[in-house]
Image: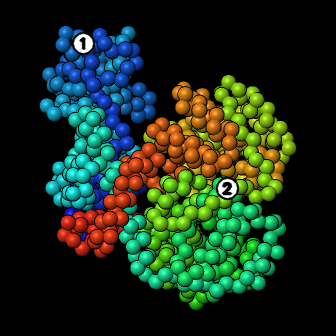
Amino acid sequence: MKNNALFSPVTDLKGVGTKTAANLGSLGIYSIYDLLFYFPFRYDELQTLPLDQIMDGQKVMLKGIVATEPFVSRFGYKKSRLSFKLRIDHDVIMVNFFNQPWLKKQLEIGQEVAIYGKYNVARQSLSGFKFVVTKENDSGMAPIYPVNKHVRQKKLVDLINLAIEDFLPEVKDIVPLAIRQKYSLLSDQEIIVKMHHPKNGQEAELAKRSAIFREFFIFQIQLAELTASNNQKARGKAKDYDLTEIAKLTSSLPFELSADQKEVVNEIFTDLHSPRQMRRLLQGDVGSGKTVVAIYAIYAAITAGYQAALMVPTEILATQHFKKIDELLRPFGVRVALLTGNTKTLERREIYREITDGTINVVIGTHALIQDNVIFKNLGLVIIDEQHRFGVGQRQALINKGEDPDILAMTATPIPRTLALTVYGDMTVSEIRHLPAGRKPIISAWKTSSQMDDVYRLMREQLAAGFQIYAVTPLITESETMDLKNAEELHEKLSHDFPDQKVVLLHGQMPGAKKDEIMADFAAGEINILVTTSVIEVGVDVPNANMMIIYNAERFGLSQLHQLRGRIGRGQTQSYCMFIADPKTESGKARMKIIAATNDGFKLAEEDLKMRGEGDLFGKAQSGLPEFRVGNVVNNYNTMVVAQKVAKELIAADPELKKAVHESLREVLEYKKLEQNRI
């Protein structure tokens, strides 16, 4: 990999400096390889139509000759309109580009151009979105990429094209030829060219099919390598835990474990006592009491003389786990530490020292736990919460800090067992299917926007009784500014409609410290209504918040709606969740009926599978499944199964990928390890 130009930083591209490189980093693009394999999520089909066939307001591409000198008029601060006439056969129309004055330099009278925009029939004018200089090979398929406020579409497209021009010959295939032939897959170079520049929709689909397989194949090879190395190593260590001490923990709890919790604790204890390494996935619905099960596992490992580590995806969740675990285990002399990116330097050094000398028994943290400075004296148990949020490499980096420690992964999003086994390799699956005693099921209802009076009535009742409310507005991946605007408008509306309540806005673009401060105020009861985008995390616990209103609920997947709903119902009182949605499709209406009718996450997961093909029904970050750039585990499940089979066979035949035919695959895997450990 050392000499492979593909893995060199983006600054090796002409015109890319440190600022552009930092901006690309916000999209997860660090190298030439990342740029080449950063694929569009959709395409605008730029088809040309005769003027008399275009409907008013239709988006269309028109080709013609620039007939007049382009003219820029300015109005207001940084606002401009670039206008010129375009001759199309015998007709002449007006073209306007707003706030793109620089296009003037690219236009001259007599030039043939293609403009993609929105047509106004009455005015015979086109409001331009995209300027396309016509080429003989112009495909009429415009790729649209996931971008953010730091990187614009045009800039990204230019850089990708430059990378293709300069580096495409360096790209070698990672899926062996025999496999590609068997499953009719494209080569890596073909995937790159046809994903970024398809000639038509059919070519884009074929390229996407190969790109999905390639992505799943890399993931499954990583899992197969991990499984093979785990099986070759020592079988783990039997832990001789102290049942007398564990009985004291049980009698100290202010509640009794549910039957499901007891069963899972017993399964984990059997694993700990066995000389085989535990590799168990614990699935439990939102609020089902997985943390308490984790506490039993931690305490058992500690009484056997080992240390434990719990890694979670966010600081707010790490802090919450720390408080709960410290409160329950401190009375037994257990030293619990919290380690995140915000831990102060002096405190951090002290924690490092005490982990190494064994004074600290259990450490809870974010991926700060996988830093080189974290050296355990005797790590015997690794717990990874919401494990789909971590890369295979990150999970392994923590596991490597112990000598064959037992591994317990947890997810708050139940996924069907078959899917879990495909995605998580050879883990044994445990399930907590029922909520702890005393919890009242959340009353859910689907309301259309015309039924808001009913919703407001219930909100006023709950606020008068001293409860707090979440108002959630969805994230739209294409536009951060639009997300913020929606959230700000909702905040303004609720502030106006509930003038006697403290209404506060929380959104993803706020600094981490500000988010934490707002959540702390909400948890302390100082905020009555929290307006938020879907950044509220899995596991965030505010027992007094007993009502949630989810606006535009049709934009969320079933599992994500269920995750969000799980933020309430944490206390002993009755909770309510209102889904506000005006779905246009039958499947959209069906989803609203299902989510309002059932609180069972396992049942919803099954429904999600049945309805696959309706787009990304699992919400991305909170789906219980790993995130992929091109593929979707639910919609492309069969491809994942084939990728798993092929990867297992390949690793069985060449465990260390030493054959020459696997050289480029080995290089990509090495690069992926670096990428996943990038903090």
Give x and y (percent) for residue 281.
56, 64
Give residue 433's mark: 2
SS for tag 2?
loop
Give x and y (percent) for residue 662.
23, 66
Q: Amino acid at mark 1?
A: Val
Which residue is nearer to you in this view: 456 or 204? 204
Mark nearest the camera among 1 and 2 is 2
Extreme-bottom residue of the structure: 357
Extreme-right residue of the structure: 465
Please give left or right for residue 98 compared with residue 515 in the image.
left
* Quadrant hosting residue 665: bottom left
- Quadrant of the rendering where the N terminus is positioned: bottom left
Q: Residue at the spot x=40%, y=54% of the render?
A: 641
SS for tag 1?
strand
Does label 1 or label 2 sit earlier along the sequence? 1
- Residue 140 in sight: yes
Give residue 229's mark: none
- Quadrant of the rendering where the C terminus is positioned: bottom left
Q: Are marks 1 and 2 in contact (CB under 8 Å)?
A: no
- Residue 307 in sight: no
Give x and y (percent) for residue 471.
67, 41
* Quadrant hosting residue 592: top right
Give x and y (percent) for residue 363.
61, 76
Q: Residue at the spot x=44%, y=44% of the render?
A: 635
Characterize the local packing of mark 1: few (<14), some (14-19) or many (20 or more) Cα atoms within 10 angstroms. Answer: some
Vertical relation: 426 (above or below) 638:
below
Characterize the local packing of mark 2: few (<14), some (14-19) or many (20 or more) Cα atoms within 10 angstroms. Answer: some
Q: CA distance from mark 1 to mark 2?
A: 67 Å
Vertical relation: 147 (above or below) 349:
above
Q: Residue at the spot x=60%, y=63% of the render?
A: 430
Q: Read off the residue under disc 1.
A: 92
